[in-house]
Amino acid sequence: MEDKKEPQPSVPPIVDQLKEYAETRFKLLKYEAIEGGTSILASIIADLVTVISMVLAFLFASVTLGFFLADILHSYWMGFGCIAVLYFLIAMFIKIFKRHLERPLINIFIQKIFKR
């Protein structure tokens, strides 16, 4: 019986394997960074569109409420004056409780940035 040895496949040296691993790892990190950046950008754009829509809805609701109060009070300046006083009170409320409102907003932004 003859010993027939099959040729062994040549194993690349360890240096070549390490180079291949490093290149693959670099590509993976690059793709993960691209995914993270585009995810954050898409989230910001979606939030921006939502905020703009809400601001417009709020603006038109304010004008509508002003005209409604003007009709009830029979005076445009009183109707829109009531809306101005309402916004002034909201602004004062926010000014007084600014510290309590900042922390949750900061946490929301941090969660949005590091969301996976």
Image (cartoon, helix red, strand yellow):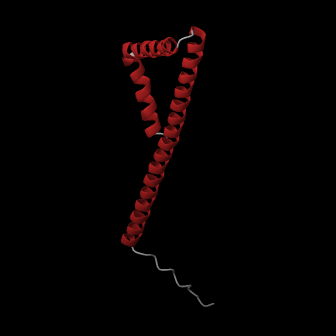
Coordinates of residue 86 in the picture (x, y in percent): 48, 13
Say which quarter of the image contains residue 29: bottom left
Q: Quadrant of residue 113?
A: top left
Number of labelled discs? 0
In this view, 27 is above or below 50: below
Residue 56 drawn at (x, y percent)? 53, 32
Residue at 39%, 74% in the rendered image: 13
Instruction: Answer above or below: position of 78 versus 44.
Output: above
Looking at the picture, tell me which residue is in the foreground, 49 or 36: 49
Check the image and name the residue furthest to the right.
1
Q: Give left or right: position of 93 versus 7.
A: left
Between 12 and 115, the one nearer to me in the picture: 115
Please tell me which residue lies in front, 81 or 57. 81
Q: Residue furthest top?
A: 73
Residue that appears at 46% across and 34% down: 111
User: Outermost residue, bottom direction?
Assistant: 2
The x and y percentages for residue 50 are 54, 36
Depth check, front residue: 85 or 41: 85
Left-right relation of 114 to 63: left
Residue located at (54% from left, 18% from top): 66
